[in-house]
Amino acid sequence: MEVAAGSYEYVKIPVAQMLTGSETGLPLHCVRGAKPGPTLSVLACVHGDEPQPIRAFQNVLAQIDRAQLSGALLVVPVANPFAFANFSRQSPDQHEQTNLWGAFPGSAKGTLTQRYAHKIRELLIEGADYLVECHSGGAAGRIQRRVDMDPDIEGAAGEKSREMAIAFASGGAALVHGVPFSKSSASGHALAQKIPAVSVEIGGAYLPECEENLYRENLEEGFLNLLVHLGMLPGEEKRLRITYFGFANRAEANPSSGGYLISRKTHFADLGAKVSEGELLGEMLDPFSLEVVEELRSPADGVLFFSRCSGPFEVGNKGFAVATEYREI
Ligand SMILES: [Zn+2]
């Protein structure tokens, strides 16, 4: 897509013709700054039940002064419209890979999910200088607040990804998780091509407005601070004190059966906050007998980085997650 310097375009890129006869597409916002510079690609709703970034994107795009912008910004607010319409992590294809998160590099002649991966790779990864994949909490009340980076990537792409994670988290999330990325995710695929990439996990779905605003501010401030960090917007980069923890240093408190979760950790401020070993995180109510059947307690002292709002909970899912060893960076 050719977009003139200093201009903005929104297009739906055709992906496939459906059985209904309608054409399905990839929604792409392209903002080209008046000055030359790098290309940053930003994706959300790779998982269809994670809508938190959408309003943040709306606000950031509305705020950007193209006369001040160096380089180009490519933004896809809904990367998997089929999963989005179903409020699901998966798209409703009949075959195989239905999780767009793990469908890269994709295929132009594959399943619908693979075709979306192919189009995203072609338009947002190849030729990009940096990639940000934005996830959030979502179905079944998941809430999150952190930025993920892959600590195993060596060289310039690894170092730049680390800096990007710190710049984004300095928007307020203040928590960075070092976790190896799957090579079949968009950000893992980008890293394999030596394109610096991070994966953001901030917010939830259908949150009360007072909570939604707080997560959204983390996203907006993180996004804008990253643009400053990358030299795409003028200004002074913010740098918060960040809590960093690795993948090996985490522990979970998961319900042993399905039921109604009564959560004690439902607030924005609970995420990134310290918890003590044995602290009550939630209780499981049997929705049939109406008895409390299980207490969920923190398995260790640490920092809570994954939680849930109260509501029905299916067995086998994660309840709460705590970083057990961490350091300030
Ligand atoms: Zn996700």
Image: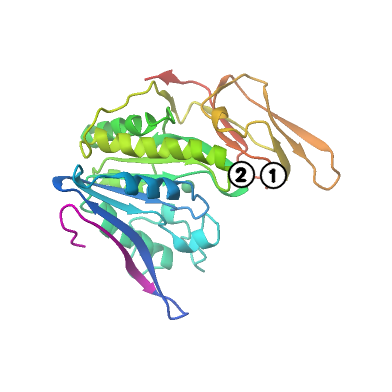
| Residue 7: quarter of image | bottom left
| Residue 222 seen in the current view | yes
For mark 1, what is the residue? 311
What residue lies at 32% left-to-right and 52% top-to-bottom?
75
Labels 1 and 2 touching (C-beta < 8 A):
yes
**Residue named by callout 2:** 141
Labels 1 and 2: the sequence-earlier one: 2
Instruction: State the quadrant of the C terminus.
Output: top left
Q: Is residue 158 magenta?
A: no
Q: Position of residue 121 (x, y in %)?
A: 30, 56
Label 2: few (<14), some or many (≥20) within 10 Å?
many
List x then y, in percent, for residue 299. 63, 24
Question: Residues in magenta?
Answer: 1-16
**Residue type, mark 1 in image:** Gly
Residue occupying the point 64% across, 25% down: 298
What's under tag 2, amino acid-wise?
A: Gly
**Residue placed most toward the observer, 275 or 101:** 275
Element carrying mark 1: strand
- 10 Å crowding of disc 1: few (<14), some (14-19), many (20+): some
